[in-house]
Image (cartoon, helix red, strand yellow):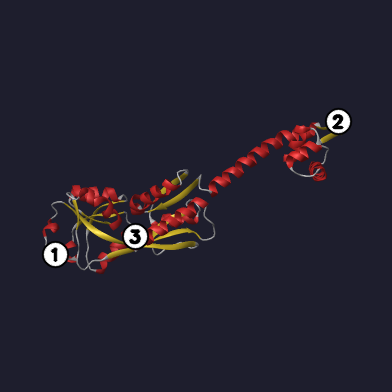
Amino acid sequence: MRSLLAVAEHGVVTDASRILGVSQSALSRRMAQLEELFGTPLLARSPRGVTLTPIGELVAREGATLVQRFDRLKAEVRANLRLDLGVVRVGGGASAVGFLLPPAIAAFQQRFPGVVFHLKEAGSRDIEAAVVNEELELGIITLPARAHGLRVTPLCNDRIVLVAGKGHPLLARRRVSARHLQGQALVGFEGGSAIRQLIDGALRAVNVDMNVVMELRSVAAILKMVETTKSLGFVSELAVLAEVPKARASVRVLPVSGLEIQRDLALVSHGARSLSPAAEKFAELIIERAGSAHG
């Protein structure tokens, strides 16, 4: 198509072949192949040169648009490979989206400001489903993974700690054991979420039954409710490191002897699909940062 446009512009095969950097015979073969493809002459030849036939004008007009689109596509592909452009679709739970991903995204966009991020906050099982259904390329979940067909890369271990608002009676005790939590009001994560199941299982293991007074998804909302309602709450240590120091006067971590809750976080992607260049690079960054933090 580029050859046809060059011939149409210059009107002489000799000039067109020189511009294209091919021999006259090679250019003539290209024109013959194009005419064979369309089943009709595209060029009218005369001693003074060549001109387009009416069908040739139609092909050249539409062909110019195709060439422009192809050039734009090629440029966009190259920009994506250089990470000048790109989209990363990633998701995770409240702790991941609220505290783990933001600093990683900020560091990534400092290096690749043209890359756009689409974030989804949901429970681990919903994130797994979104990755399997190719709504997301990457997800951060609590292990073990339940969905089939995922590529799973362990990231880090995250402790789940108990927090209490200023003035809570348990903060006055020198030592708090699991039995002191019996019947205490608890602001919990949504029922059925992976982290909630982990917390409930740990409490059952020590024969403690707490009084869940509300269920929330947002870590920030749980911390605020702990502060204002004088209830207790279990949150990720990731959130504690990021948020509790800012509100040290109103919310404190409450160590509980005999109760240790931990979870393993992992990065998941579709096992049968390759990642986009931007998502692949971001996955490398997430894994590297997790390894550095663990070290």
Q: Which disc, if any, is residue 48?
A: 2
Q: What element carries label 1?
A: loop
**Quadrant of the drawing holding the N terminus:** top right
Q: Is residue 238 above or below residue 116?
A: below
Mark 1 = which residue?
A: 175
Residue lying at 14% horizontally and 54% vertically, measured from the top left: 168
Which amino acid lies under the numbered mark 1 shown in the image of this protein? Arg
At 19% across and 67% down in the image, what residue appears?
A: 257
Q: In this view, does 119 lie to the left or right of 258?
A: right
Mark 1 or mark 2, earlier in chain: 2
The picture places residue 121, in percent across and down from the top left corner, at: 38, 50
User: How far apart, in angstroms, are the residues tagged by discs 1 and 3?
Assistant: 30 Å
The front one of 245 and 258 is 245
| The image quarter in which residue 172 lies | bottom left
Residue 293 marker: 3
Residue 151, how many percent across, how many down? Answer: 48, 62
